[in-house]
Amino acid sequence: MYSVTREDLRRHVTVMTMDGLAKFGGMQKGAIPDLLEPELLTFASDRGMMVCGFEEIDGRRYYQGWWLTWIGE
């Protein structure tokens, strides 16, 4: 998560991104668009967490919730 200034919104916006790890500690851009203004709805330490926000694709907002689960390796 990080914060950016959006000139079209005239304010700072929190962004949640789902980037992956590349070789040698680098970051690889994920296929999922960034979630803007994410809010944590639920958190269960043994199952996962629910986050809601919106994505912008071609100038349109798509409001949605993400259920993120933990995976064991």
Image (cartoon, helix red, strand yellow):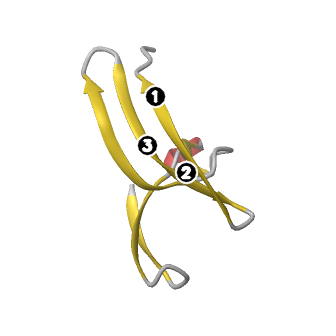
Q: Are marks 1 and 2 in contact (CB under 8 Å)?
A: no
Residue at disc 2, secondary structure: strand
Closer to the camera, 47 or 61?
Answer: 61
Residue 27 - label: 2
Please tell me which residue lies in front, 23 or 68.
68
Cα separation between marks 1 and 3: 9 Å
Question: Mark 1 sits on what residue?
Answer: 67
Residue 46 lies, in percent from the top left, at 28, 14
Q: Nearer the viewer, mark 1 or mark 3?
A: 3
Q: Report the amino acid beneath label 1.
A: Trp
Q: Which residue was labeled with disc 3?
A: 52
Q: Of callouts 3 and 2, which one flags the residue occurring earlier in the amino acid sequence? A: 2
Q: Nearer the viewer, mark 3 or mark 2?
A: 3
Q: Earlier in the sequence, mark 1 or mark 2?
A: 2
Kindly identify the amino acid type of the residue bearing the numbered disc 2: Met
Where does the image place residue 34, in percent across and percent down from the top left?
A: 56, 54
For the point 53% across and 44% down, the residue is 18
- Measured in 3D between alpha carbons, the distance from the residue under mark 1 to the one under mark 2, in whole angstroms, is 22 Å
Q: Secondary structure at mark 3?
A: strand
Whole-percent x and y of residue 63? 55, 48
Residue 55 place in picture, x, y as percent:
58, 54
Q: Nearer the viewer, mark 1 or mark 2?
A: 1
Q: In the figure, 68 relative to 55: above or below? A: above
Classify 10 Å Cα crowding around label 2: few (below 14), some (14-19), many (20 and above).
Answer: few
Kindly identify the amino acid type of the residue bearing the numbered disc 3: Cys
**Left or right of residue 43, residue 2 in this image:** right
Q: Is residue 27 above or below residue 12?
A: above
Quarter of the figure with the C terminus: top left
Toward which corner of the image does residue 57 lie, by quadrant? Answer: bottom right
Q: CA distance from mark 3 to mark 2?
A: 24 Å
- Residue 27 higher or lower than 58, as above or below: above
Which corner quadrant holds the N terminus? bottom left
